[in-house]
Image (cartoon, rainbow, N blue to C red):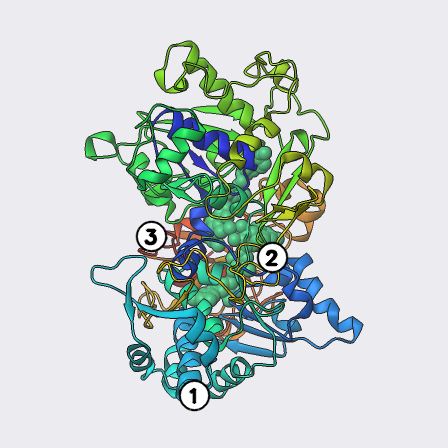
């Protein structure tokens, strides 16, 4: 199964249980591998547990907000308004934009630091270097709450412990002048950033999204940004937080918490750990040993093996795609999901609400109900779980994704598949009504006789205590606008959410008197890890043949592959087609006019599209940007699929291309 951060929590939970608990098959991975995987490995190796400690409340009180290569004016517009609107109320907030191009977000920032791709690694090390060299790191905080770490041989996610002296020595070369050479950001701006972090009276929030995660050093740069917050003590007070922003509505809730990654189990479990498999087998009432201890293939590997003929080792024969459009959004499409053709020996099932690049090459299309046409739950960036009820009926034969999974499971059960039975011989999705009778939820006409979401969520909730991600009962979410975990019950029976995790004043799991307690520490001593990670150059760098950098990403009007937003006339009219953002100087040199059709070509593929000069955003000379929403312009034929060694997340933000006019 290739799933999604746009799955509802019950959808992902049902698919995960069906695969890992039913079929003993761990080959289930979501599109969030392309999106949040590096944030996950960053949190795990820093704090021992996934997801941000802070919350959106930080944005109401921070004095400084730093954007590490993201464009929230277009990608998180509501949240970004929440920050900049503070200025209308007479509040001061300093915004710093570190990016490879000027965007609509830049226009609201006091500082714009133009960096080279991957320069972020050098910048973060430059800040740490200055804090240490000038003796202005937060010694009390570090002494009490931090330990130091660096890469191990062979490389493992948790690396090896190092001393402060070793950390200091490793940072030695990252002087502001050296960092300027590596990153392109002026030495004076590196000093300016270090001054901000050295000032204990400021409250600083860092925000990031795909610039840091879609990175072959994605885990490393996540570690480094957490590291400067920890080193300077800008952590754990309202307004002081390193906060990774999530892209999809439920990449946190469904992927990271429900554990729908190829190694995951609900509640933050890992299939390789005996204790975690045992807990899942107990909660699911499965015979011992049902869950396979070997992680399945991550997204890139899964698609490579699907696109490779069986005789050449392509051992994935069937993929069921739910709520995602890989024939447009996987990288290096010629290699991974050729949108033009599919091996006829292989079988592709696609659940979607509209015709897409992926349904076009599918062997079987399952029409699906959209969010307003079904019950659902999502979990967002700030650990908030939310619930909604269906508002309208789905048209025609469109069905809930959860129902599709359950109906297939039931059919396998009917045919005697042993995996669809629990330890007592009962169907793994057995659901009873208020009178205790089995509800025939495998028949769509009876699916809403009971609330299947509530039934699945209550089962799932039993996993949430393992990593202190405690969830409230389903009905609590019906009564609120959502609750941020851990949600704990007071003596009076009421449920209380947590806004600042690991901070004693707000998190009930923090040891009393400790102030801050990283209670899932990888070193089991309540400490977080401050990492040293070196600057490493990007995987592909422009040369004489392919002299330009290409960055890809998004625009305000469209959602990813545009299957939904492209069908809304106003949005289509506002942003009708993809374009290449090119600097006026480069355009003049190449004789390219605004709006003229050009070819953008890498070692992997080429696309033709119009040039846009002085558009809403601007790239410096030598840099291009192309959005990926337009199905007719398969820019992912051009992008790289090189990925981070720990997170397996590919880099869509930088590769080498050439651009030229198309002769007419
Ligand atoms: N309107 C709209 N909003 C969306 C989405 C959408 O499709 N449409 N999608 C959602 C999803 S799932 C996601 S993941 C988010 C993405 O949200 P963002 O990450 O904010 O947006 P992108 O356009 O993917 O990222 C482009 C930025 O990457 C930066 N970048 C390039 N190279 C580097 C580098 O080497 N290092 C660093 N640090 N930065 C670099 C550039 O400065 C560039 O502006 O948006 C979410 N919001
Ligand atoms: N070049 C480039 N490529 C990228 C990225 C990039 O920055 N650059 N970013 C990557 C990232 S961060 C992400 S998150 C991915 C996103 O990539 P995808 O997930 O592939 O893109 P979407 O367009 O969101 O696809 C969601 C699909 O689900 C369908 N759908 C909507 N609602 C439902 C439903 O309720 N049920 C079902 N069954 N289907 C539904 C939609 O019609 C759509 O086809 O793209 C990745 N690809
Ligand atoms: Mo994403």
Mark number displayed over residue 546 = none
Which image quadrant for residue 17?
top left
Secondary structure under the numbered disc 2 in the rendered image: helix
Return the residue at label 2.
Answer: 75
Secondary structure under the numbered disc 1 in the rendered image: loop
Return the residue at label 1.
Answer: 135
Q: Position of residue 350 (x, y in %)?
A: 47, 29
Are the residues flagged by discs 1 and 3 in contact, CB closer than 8 Å?
A: no
Viewer-side label of 1, 2 = 1
Which image quadrant for residue 544?
bottom left
Mark number displayed over residue 604 = 3
Q: Position of residue 472 (x, y in %)?
A: 61, 40
Q: Of 140 and 246, which appears nearest the observer?
A: 140
Q: Is residue 316 above or below residue 606?
A: above
- The residues tagged by marks 1 and 2 sit, at their Cα atoms, a distance apart of 38 Å
Question: Is residue 465 in view from this perspective?
Answer: yes
Q: Quadrant of the N terminus?
A: top left
- The residues tagged by marks 2 and 3 sit, at their Cα atoms, a distance apart of 28 Å
The CB of the residue at mark 2 lies under 8 Å from ligand 1: yes
Between discs 2 and 3, the one toward the N terminus: 2
């Amino acid at each position: 199964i290739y799933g999604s951060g746009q799955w509802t929590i019950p959808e992902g939970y049902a698919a995960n249980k069906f695969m890992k608990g039913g079929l003993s098959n761990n080959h289930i991975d979501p599109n969030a591998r392309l999106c949040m995987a590096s944030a996950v490995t960053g949190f795990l190796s820093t704090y021992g547990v996934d997801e941000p400690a802070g919350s959106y409340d930080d944005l109401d009180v921070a004095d400084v907000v730093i954007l590490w290569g993201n464009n929230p004016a277009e990608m998180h517009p509501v949240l970004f308004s929440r920050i900049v609107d503070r200025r209308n109320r007479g509040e001061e907030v300093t915004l710093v934009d570190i990016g490879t191009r000027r965007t609509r977000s830049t226009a609201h920032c006091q500082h714009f630091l133009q960096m080279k791709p991957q320069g972020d690694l050098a910048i973060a090390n430059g800040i740490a270097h200055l804090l240490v060299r000038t003796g202005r790191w937060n010694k009390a905080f570090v002494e009490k709450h931090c330990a130091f770490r660096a890469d191990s041989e062979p490389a493992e996610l948790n690396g090896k412990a190092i001393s402060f002296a070793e950390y200091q020595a490793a940072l030695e070369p990252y002087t502001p002048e050296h960092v300027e050479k590596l990153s392109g950001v002026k030495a004076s701006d590196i000093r300016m950033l270090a001054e901000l972090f050295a000032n204990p009276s400021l409250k600083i929030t860092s925000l990031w999204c795909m610039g840091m995660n879609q990175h072959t050093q994605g885990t490393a740069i996540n570690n480094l940004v957490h590291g400067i917050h920890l080193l300077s003590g800008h952590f754990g007070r309202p307004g002081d937080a390193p906060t990774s922003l999530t892209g999809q509505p439920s990449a946190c809730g469904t992927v990271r918490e429900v554990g729908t990654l190829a190694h995951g189990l609900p509640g933050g479990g890992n299939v390789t750990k005996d204790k975690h498999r045992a807990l899942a087998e107990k909660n699911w009432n499965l015979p011992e040993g049902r869950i396979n201890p070997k992680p399945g293939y991550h997204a890139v590997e899964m698609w490579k093996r699907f696109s490779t003929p069986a005789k050449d080792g392509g051992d994935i024969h069937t993929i069921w795609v739910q709520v995602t459009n890989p024939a447009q959004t996987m990288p290096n499409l010629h290699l991974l999901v050729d949108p033009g053709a599919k091996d006829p020996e292989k079988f592709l099932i696609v659940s979607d609400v509209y015709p897409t690049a992926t349904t076009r090459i599918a062997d079987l299309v399952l029409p699906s109900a959209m969010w307003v046409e079904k019950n659902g739950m999502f979990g967002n960036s700030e650990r908030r779980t939310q619930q909604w009820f269906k508002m309208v009926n789905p048209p025609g034969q469109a069905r809930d994704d959860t129902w599709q999974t359950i109906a297939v499971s039931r059919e396998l059960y009917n045919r005697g598949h042993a995996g669809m039975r629990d330890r007592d011989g009962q169907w793994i999705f057995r659901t009873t009504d208020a009178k205790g009778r089995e509800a025939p939820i495998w028949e769509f006409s009876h699916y809403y006789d009971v609330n299947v979401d509530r039934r699945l969520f209550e089962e799932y909730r039993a996993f949430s205590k393992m990593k202190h991600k405690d969830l409230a009962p389903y009905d609590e979410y019906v009564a609120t606008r959502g609750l941020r975990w851990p949600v704990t019950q007071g003596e009076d029976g009421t449920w209380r959410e947590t806004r600042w995790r690991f901070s004693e004043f707000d998190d009930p799991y923090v040891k009393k008197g400790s102030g801050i307690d990283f209670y899932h520490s990888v070193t089991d001593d309540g400490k977080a890890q401050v990492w040293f990670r070196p600057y490493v150059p990007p995987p592909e760098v422009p040369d004489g043949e392919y002299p330009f950098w290409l960055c890809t990403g998004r625009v305000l009007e469209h959602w990813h592959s545009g299957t939904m937003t492209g069908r809304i006339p106003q949005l289509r009219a506002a942003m009708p087609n993809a374009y290449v953002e090119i600097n006026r100087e480069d355009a003049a040199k190449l004789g390219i006019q605004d709006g003229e059709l050009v070819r953008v070509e890498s070692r992997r593929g080429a696309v033709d599209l119009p040039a846009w000069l002085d558009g809403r955003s601007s790239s410096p000379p030598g840099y291009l940007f192309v959005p990926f929403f337009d199905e007719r312009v398969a820019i992912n034929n051009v992008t790289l699929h090189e990925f981070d060694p720990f997170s397996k997340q590919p880099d869509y933000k930088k590769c080498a291309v050439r651009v030229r006019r198309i002769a007419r």
